[in-house]
Image (cartoon, rainbow, N blue to C red):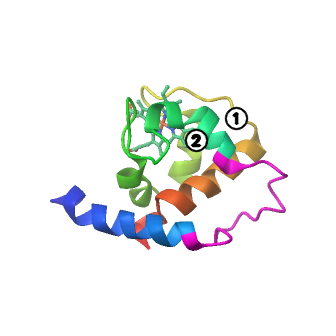
Amino acid sequence: MFTTRLLPLALMTLFIGCNKDAVDSGVTEEEVEPVNGAEVYAASCAGCHSADGTGATGPSLVESVPTLSDEILLDVIENGVGSMPDMGLSTPEADAVFLYVRGEFGEFGGA
Ligand code: HEC
């Protein structure tokens, strides 16, 4: 099944992600101002998706983030989706939490 196949991959990325000093993405820390993505996540996301991303009232990000393209992930963060509200983040906050979520919960395709 899809999730059982994806979960070990997602968990693996989670561990690799923890060891990385910098998140490898198009957006760099310099461009996004001194906004801490982990703090934005804790304040704006963890309440519904849990601190470790395994989900609570919101779905598990560990499972879903590796299936979402950069474009879609950023769109969800900036505008919300379905029953998830628009969190009203500034562009630097959205970029910082995007990098954090990618680093913690997995690159597109589980790489
Ligand atoms: C008020 C609760 C709530 C908050 C706060 C919240 N989310 Fe969500 N999120 C949800 C719900 C509920 C869904 C499912 C929406 C739907 O499909 O109807 C969701 C969906 C998502 C998805 C898409 C999952 C998928 O399978 O397509 C992502 C990614 C996501 N949230 C990330 C975030 C991030 C990052 C933040 C912080 C900026 C955040 N969420 C804040 C409740 C929340």
Amino acid beneath label 1: Leu
Q: Residue at x 38, y 34 (%)?
A: 56
Give the magenta-colored segment's residue range.
Answer: 19-38
Amino acid beneath label 2: Ile
Q: Secondary structure at mark 1?
A: loop
Q: Is residue 33 left or right of residue 72?
A: right
Q: Residue at x 56, y 62 (%)?
A: 103
Cβ–Cβ under 8 Å for marks 2 and 1: yes
* Res 27 quadrant in image: bottom right
* Res 109 quadrant in image: bottom left
Q: Quadrant of the N terminus?
A: bottom left
* Residue 19 image point, x, y percent: 57, 72
Binning the other alpha carbons within 10 Å of mark 1 as few (below 14), some (14 to 19) or many (20 upward) gives some
Disc 1 residue: CB within 8 Å of ligand 1: yes
Q: Is residue 64 left or right of residue 105?
A: left
* Residue 99 image point, x, y percent: 63, 57
Disc 2 residue: CB within 8 Å of ligand 1: yes
Q: Which mark is residue 9?
A: none
Q: Which residue is mark 2?
A: 77
* Residue 46 image point, x, y percent: 52, 37
Q: Quadrant of the C terminus?
A: bottom left
Q: Which residue is mark 1?
A: 89
The answer to whether 94 is drawn above or below residue 105 in the figure is above
Pointer 2 or 1: first along the chain: 2
Q: Residue at x 78, y 62 (%)?
A: 29
The answer to whether 87 is drawn above or below residue 36 in the figure is above
* Residue 65 image point, x, y percent: 44, 54
SS assignment for the magenta stretch, majority: loop
Q: Residue at x 84, y 52 (%)?
A: 33
